[in-house]
Image (spheres, rainbow, N blue to C red):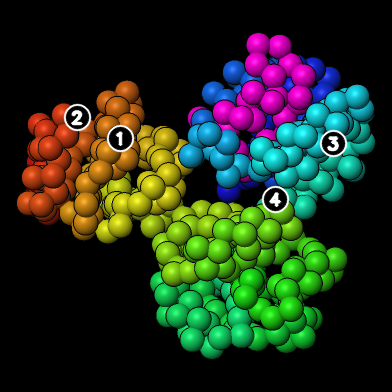
Amino acid sequence: MQLKILTVDDSRAVRIIVKKAFKTYNVEILEAANGVEGLAMASKQLPDLILLDVTMPVMDGVEMLTKLKADPSLKSVPVIMLTAEAGREMVLKIAKLGIRDYIVKPFKEDVLNEKVGRIIDLRPITETQNKRKTLSDPCEILVVEDKPAIIQQITTGIRVPTWKVHGVASTGETIDYCQKQVPDVIIISLSLPDEAAYTLFRLLRSNMKTKYVPVFALAVKTDLHAQQQAQQFGFTSIITKPIDYEELETKIAKAINLDTSERYFVFEGEYLLIRLPENASTSSVNEISAYLKPKISEAVDQGYTKVIFDVHVVRNVNMVLIKLLVDSMTICQELTLSYSLVGNPQIVQECRGFEESKDWRFHDSIDAAKASF
């Protein structure tokens, strides 16, 4: 998937410069002219990075930054502030609010690319186009960890059969491995002695072979300092122990631009089956939501008229899941598609507890759902 960069600036000229700076990279540039528009766009699109001007009408950058950091769903989005030379002192003062960097106007495109590239994994379009696209393709994951038990846990925990995990214990072994074969993803434990993780990260980013390889930091969930330090260094993402393997797989898939829709969307006969996973977590629901409109539109283009939502393996129903299904049904109605639901007695009972789903009718099998059309 494309990375998203939100540029919030009242100067159209600056927004044009930003778009031009990233035209050769696989990123989508989102635009807003003030803090109010910026917050609305950020909430809707969940960008991977925000370029935020300090001085703007309606709502300035400082106020928008404060609101971003107060929003649980947006507070982790990295922010680079843009400021005039005279505003440099102000940016340094508000750094404690959580900005990752700042750029003084006027700036050159290469400076912008360099600073953004330290935070998110910029990939040239040509490289991305040649990248493997689906979960069926092999993926090599290199884990740098001096505890063999952790490497074994990751090897066992990764459920995608075409993904292979290889473990090494030191910086030297990592460099040797990458000289022979460049992995698709590298996971580095932050608990390596003598801050070796950060030294290794610098080496990987300075080598053209591994410059664009996504590098994840592996940290203990309670070690917030280490996680913050890894973010500041520019690691692609943070994985915390104990590891949520569904989240790990989702982050890896996003980092290497895989189309993971086959996990959930299956064209079978005359039906589009949308299968929700056992653990319908926020990350998996967001992943499904990203594919929802394109896949249903694809079904219409190919002449499909019937959709089955299969939720029978879902463990627990929550409002996030209910909203996903409501949105899905609304899209089907707009496109005049027939749809049906498959669930189990527990799902039926839990759905009755929500106003939005209390009247939904479920079938107990795919075959029964097919027969209902």
Element under disc 3: strand
Residue assigned mark 4: 120
Depth-wise, is mark 2 or mark 3 nearer the camera? 3
In terms of sequence position, does the residue under pointer 1 or pointer 2 come before the other? 1
Residue drawn at (22%, 33%) of the image: 338
Residue assigned mark 2: 356
In terms of sequence position, does the residue under pointer 1 or pointer 4 come before the other? 4
In terms of sequence position, does the residue under pointer 2 or pointer 3 come before the other? 3
User: Can see residue 204?
Assistant: no
Residue assigned mark 3: 103
Front in this rendered view, residue 346 or 193:
193
Q: Check whether the beta carbons of the residues at disc 1 and disc 2 lie within 8 A of each other.
A: yes
Disc 3/disc 1 C-alpha distance (Å): 39 Å
Identify residue type, mark 1. Lys
Front in this rendered view, residue 333 or 321:
321
**Magenta region:** 44-68
Q: Is residue 62 magenta?
A: yes
Element under disc 4: loop
Instruction: Specify few, some or many for label 1: CA neighbours under 10 Å numbering under 14, 14-19, or 20 or more.
Output: some
- Residue 67 in the image: above or below residue 153: above
Element under disc 1: helix
Element under disc 2: loop
Identify residue type, mark 4. Ile
Identify residue type, mark 3. Ile
Residue assigned mark 1: 323
